[in-house]
Amino acid sequence: MQERVVPVSDFDTVLVVDFGAQYAQLIARRVRECHVYSEIVPSTTPVSELLARRPKAIILSGGPSSVYAEGAPRVPAELFAAGVPIFGICYGFQAMAQALGGTVARTGVAEFGRTPLRVAQEGVLFAGLPAEQTVWMSHGDSVTVAPEGFTVTASTEATPVAAMEAPERGLYGVQFHPEVLHSEHGTAVLKRFLDAAGCRPTWTMLNIVEDAVEKVRETIGPNGRAICGLSGGVDSAVAAAIVQRAIGDRLTCVFVDHGLLRKGEAEQVERDFVAATGVKLRVVDAADRFLKALAGVTDPEEKRKIIGREFIRVFEDEQRAIIAAADAPVDFLVQGTLYPDVVESGGGTGTANIKSHHNVGGLPDDLKFTLVEPLRTMFKDEVRRAGEELGLPPAIVWRQPFPGPGLAIRIVGEVTRERLDILREADAIAREELSRAGLDREIWQCPVVLLADVRSVGVQGDERTYGHPIVLRPVTSEDAMTADWARVPYDVLERISTRITNEVREINRVVLDVTSKPPGTIEWE
């Protein structure tokens, strides 16, 4: 997210030290929502450089490592003696405890997802908040002994030190994730830290779209030309609309119908997006090409990489055609990469690779495009807000998130034309019934997954069947970094299940996934 701001010195600044957290950007965002300017910095930043930025406060993020593991990022003890208020979250909390003489250990009991928290002392962080509250946990290690001079203010059944503070030293920490909305009073806890640190709520977020347009204009220059691949989703649509506003008809959009889209989506792109933006659009029917490349492949990571490779090669072909038609170079490739895509692909400092996103990680060495990614630091809801400001139709702006690799990664097993047809019909039924029930804005996303390599005995029409199970994965989320399974009313689930088993004869069993993220991802793969 790029903001046009007056010099940072005019605002109090909070630095978020990123230890490879899935939620580092979310922390920074929550701080900004409290009207305090924030920036993310790598955990490798020397203490002297951190302090040279004159931060009003520092927040230590979570991360995938164990603080006692070899090579795990450390926090120098000197940082805690610098007089800058510091708030440790999850890994940052454990790193603080370890650096100051506390004990961090693997207790054998992990906590993931919603967890009851008991507040023993309100202190600063919990002042005026309920003694019993629900928080969002994601950890396997625990602080078992707090450093000397700290007051333990909260605990859970499995974690004796779930929060601690030493206000006279300006040091605070929690094991849970206050930045995640599933933590009932997380924002209030974060705000109490900012208030205690003396951070003035004087910063305001300015127009995201205008800033993104200006940055694209600077990147591409007055004569540069760009190509953008439209997937049918809101991300690529908004990215294209931003670039089109910046450079006009020097942008050509390419819609690749890879045969992996949901029912009706190809037609929507060709009709609605062009009507709303007036963008130049080339349509490529590449379904056979993608199916051939995916033949025999079952590994989800390999699927993602193959689809990414084929996308790039299609763009390479289109680049030649566009150059030939325009008699001018096309140097830039626009992609709708979001921040969650980047971090899940291992794009942060020490970040674990959860899954490879098809549009993350750069381009093949032999392809000479310069990437333009105007959404790279945005979350999905911010992208939707930008789409509305750009005048995109609601059907595109509010479409459920859909992965770039499409239905290919919603088939557990080999991708074939027959399996795609089965999944496409089942997915269309689920989407139709959820819309009919008025749940489109309540449910973040409902992937429908075909367990293609699984067969299940059923009985239909008094006959034995040996069909496939379908998994419904409805979730609620704000940013895709965390998600909770959606409580879809039973009558809606019943209609979905009945219609799918009646209308899609190859399916004889419908299954509901009730797993949060973490520990599960949103997509099955």
Image: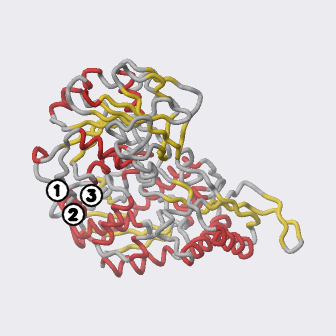
The residue at which mark 2 appears reads as 207
Q: Which label's residue is closer to the chain start, 2 or 1?
A: 1
In terms of secondary structure, where does tag 1 sit?
A: loop
Whole-percent x, y for residue 123 in the image: 34, 36
Residue 215, picture quadrant: bottom left
Distance of label 2 from label 3 (alpha carbons): 28 Å
- How many C-alpha atoms fall within 10 Å of the one at disc 1: few (<14), some, or many (≥20)? some
Dot label at residue 4? 1
Q: Amino acid at mark 3?
A: Asp
- Observer able to see residue 364: no
Tell me the mark number nearer the camera, choosing from 3 and 1. 1
Distance of label 3 from label 1 (alpha carbons): 27 Å
Residue 19, picture quadrant: top left
Discs 3, 1 touching: Cβ within 8 Å: no
Residue 331 against residue 141 in the figure, above or below? below
Q: Residue at x 42, y 55 (%)?
A: 479
Q: Nearer the viewer, residue 88 or 120?
A: 120
The residue at which mark 3 appears reads as 331
Which image quarter is the N terminus in? bottom left
Whole-percent x, y for residue 297 in the image: 62, 51
Q: Amino acid at mark 1?
A: Arg
Q: Which label's residue is closer to the chain start, 3 or 1?
A: 1
Q: Nearer the viewer, residue 93 or 159?
A: 159
Discs 2, 1 touching: Cβ within 8 Å: yes
Tell me the mark number nearer the camera, choosing from 2 and 3. 2
Q: Which label's residue is closer to the chain start, 2 or 3?
A: 2
- Observer able to see residue 355: yes
- How many C-alpha atoms fall within 10 Å of the one at disc 2: few (<14), some, or many (≥20)? few
In terms of secondary structure, where does tag 2 sit?
A: loop
Whole-percent x, y for residue 523 in the image: 55, 54
Discs 2, 3 touching: Cβ within 8 Å: no
Whole-percent x, y for residue 302 in the image: 55, 48
